[in-house]
Image (tube, grey):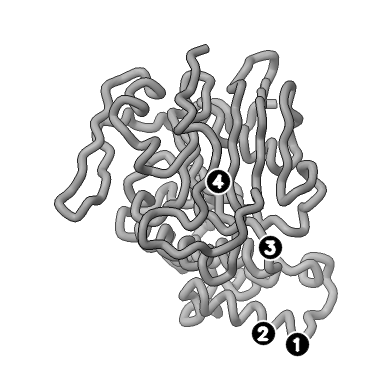
Amino acid sequence: MSAIPAAQRTQPQTGGEAGKPPCAPSAPAVQLDGAQARIGGHVVWSEASISIAQGEFAAILGPNGSGKTTLLRVLLGELALTEGTVSVLGKPPGAQQGQIGYLPQRRHFEAGTRIRGIDLVRLGLDGARWGLPLRRSDGARVEEVLELVGASGYATRPIGRLSGGEQQRLLIAQALVGQPRMLLLDEPLDSLDLPNQSAVAALLERICRREHVSVLLVAHDVNPLLSYLDRVVYFGSGQAVVGTPQQVVTAETLSRLYGVPVEVLQTADGRLVVVGLPEAPAHHTDRHAH
């Protein structure tokens, strides 16, 4: 397995991109050292050393089947490493579940689904989950997150009648309502059109800064996210390359990880645009493997 350049490996530069203020202390929210993950006897990735600071907005990227969702499973304590070490919010995976808001791969609500958006968000509170009455402070928190995600105006409507972008905002609010220290989101931009992808990416950055929450999301297309990210974790060829977008999102690195030529262009205002990534197949090989 080829070595990963030292500058692209793990050490975070707190504060993200130039011009972004630091939003949290530098103690890692996620730390993996020499990590290897296997599924069904197959090594998904190995020698992965990943460090993400508290309060950073990070994307987990790479070709399909490269192990993006596998990393989420490791962080959630669903899959044990076969080599190396991992900590989440300073504890072993699974020990801080109450501090993590998790949004699995996009759910699809049928048009006839009658549950209101506000009730869906309340399900993110332990009291609502166990059928206990909501405290006044809980109701205030629900209203707070609805306002934060921009969903107050339609939260009382049945979720089946809302657009995909509106539904996704409510699901993010549900993951956020319990005041977690970390959000883990599995392809939250999937099936959204480009304007909604950009809007959700901007929303997640705002949550990171305002709530001081570490945000890690799996994504297929990096372009809607690049303007907002502090850090990227790129999987490919059994490796993990980690760093700021400027360090990692280069034609040389992405071409090596994807195994096909990938171009990275820079616009007049300095934004990066990735061109030539292969299209995502319908199913992700590491999503439900055991």
Rendering quarter of residue 266: top left
Quadrant of the frame with the C terminus: top right
Q: Amino acid at mark 2?
A: Ala
Q: Residue furthest left?
A: 268
Say whether residue 221 is visible: yes
Whichever of labels 1 and 4 marks the residue nearer the N terminus, that label is: 1
Q: Are marks 4 and 2 in contact (CB under 8 Å)?
A: no
Check disc 2 and report the residue beneath it.
140
**Residue depicted at x 53% and y 64%:** 23
Mark 1 and mark 3: Cα distance apart in space? 19 Å
Secondary element at image label 1: helix
Cα–Cα span, label 4 and label 2: 27 Å
Instruction: Give the spatial CA distance, label 1 vs label 4.
Output: 31 Å
Q: Which mark is on residue 186? A: 4
Q: Quadrant of residue 51?
A: top right
The picture places residue 234, in percent across and down from the top left corner, at: 46, 33
Q: Which amino acid does the dot numbered 1 rest on?
A: Arg
- In this rendering, the answer to whether 231 lies above or below 262 is below
Q: Are marks 2 and 1 in contact (CB under 8 Å)?
A: yes
Q: In the drawing, does residue 93 fall left or right of residue 142?
A: right
Please tell me which residue lies in front, 125 or 283. 125
Side of 33 relative to 68 (left or right): right
In the image, residue 201 sits, relative to residue 139, either above or below, namely: above
Other-residue count near label 3 (Cα within 10 Å), few / some / many at <14 / 14–19 / ≥20: some
